[in-house]
Amino acid sequence: MLKIADKTFRSRLFGGTGKFASSQVMKEALAASGAEMITVALRRVDLNNPEDDIMANLDRHTYWFLPNTSGARDAEEAIRLANLARAVGRTNWLKLEVTPDPRTLLPDPVETLKATELLVKDGFVVLPYINADPILALRLQDVGAAAVMPLGSPIGTNQGILTRFQVEIIIEQARVPVVVDAGLGAPSHAAAAMEMGADAVLVNTAIAVAGDPVRMARAFAQAVEAGRTAYESGLGMQDRQAAASSPEVGLDFLR
Amino acid sequence: MVIICNGKEQKVPEGCTLHQLLLQLQLDPDTVVVECDKQVVKRNDYEGTVLAEGQNLELIRFVGGG
């Protein structure tokens, strides 16, 4: 079981709710993914479309909501969004995202650290989205982050884990759960993260934009489970030298 | 009287409460959060909050995101 702050989760796959073609597809894909924790964003109500309400499609009792601060460009904006999230969602959990550069959507480490410290003091359970920086991950743990969410590759790029070396160090050093977030484009990427010892992964785009999001959600769920089981089972060491799997003795009759 | 609602002018009757405004806009007060002049209004206060001329309201809710 995965434990973050005071809450336990059976599923190590966290779902995103963005980019789905319809609410119906989103609902079915989330159900197929087995995710218990799902992310949502905060935006102005579209007053021309008052009935367009994601909460009408998602059961608060089925899912644990993790509001994000997407769109925030600095700590101040993130904190404003955090307070809105707490008010609308009746939750003090937060995926802290501070992304000043729209081209890369890479997170700002300085503002993220600053906001984490202030939000933790204000009673939030903060899961910061970060570049895969082992030192930053430690600093965030020091100020009370409940988990760290290093990126595999930039948001929405489907490029997989380009940050392998750094994510491995983050996992080695972690005293809080590590959730690999962003860029996981295929079930094999999610499995790789879990085999490395990540505690969970967050997947949105790869499922939402798949040809068949419901089946893709299932594929990710299977991959996460396989990867976790493999990690717990203890993977064999890698070697540069070949080692025969079949016995090397008993070949005398050939020569 | 006129207030600003999500960046646009909105006519509301005198004495209109925040709760009444949300119903007028066909919004579920349970899933919408309101910032009034940048201060978050507690959901329990929606019925008791009487709107005033020129107030700047932001109506926010959860949408799909990653």
Image (tube, grey):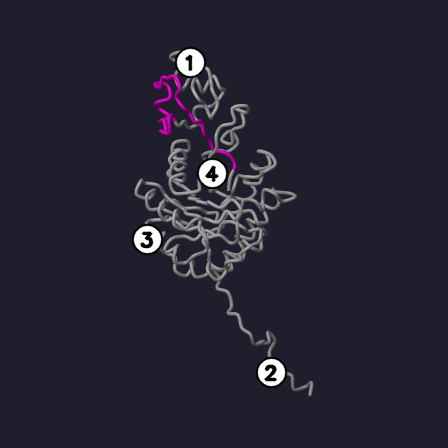
The amino acid sitting under disc 2 is: Val
Stretch in magenta: B36-64
Closer to us: mark 4 or mark 2?
4
Kindly state the secondary structure of the residue where label 4 is placed: loop
Q: Amino acid type of disc 4? A: Tyr
Residue A223: % across, % down: 56, 53
Q: Are marks 2 and 3 on the same chain?
A: yes
Q: CA distance from mark 1 to mark 2?
A: 95 Å
Q: Quadrant of the N terminus of chain B?
A: top left
Label 3 with label 1: CB-CB less than 8 Å: no
Specify few, some or many for label 4: CA neighbours under 10 Å numbering under 14, 14-19, or 20 or more: some
Vertical side of A49 occupied by A126: above or below: below
Give the label, 2 or 3, closer to the camera. 3
User: In 3D space, how far apart are the residues under numbered discs 2 and 3 (Cα atoms)?
Assistant: 55 Å
Disc 3 marks which residue?
A142
Residue appearing at x 40%, y 40% in the figure: A78
Give coordinates of residue B61: x percent, y percent. 46, 30
Residue B49 within the magenta-colored segment of the rendering: yes
Residue denoted by label 4 = A63
Q: Position of residue B48 (x, y in %)?
A: 34, 18
Q: Secondary structure at mark 1?
A: loop
Q: Position of residue A208 (x, y in %)?
A: 58, 42
Q: Amino acid under label 3?
A: Asp
Q: Residue at x 62, y 44 (%)?
A: A210
Q: Quadrant of residue B17?
A: top left
Label 2: which residue?
A249
Q: Are marks 4 and 3 on the same chain?
A: yes
Whole-angstrom CA distance, mark 3 to mark 1, is: 51 Å
Give the distance between the C-alpha atoms of the residues marked 4 and 2, in whole angstroms: 57 Å
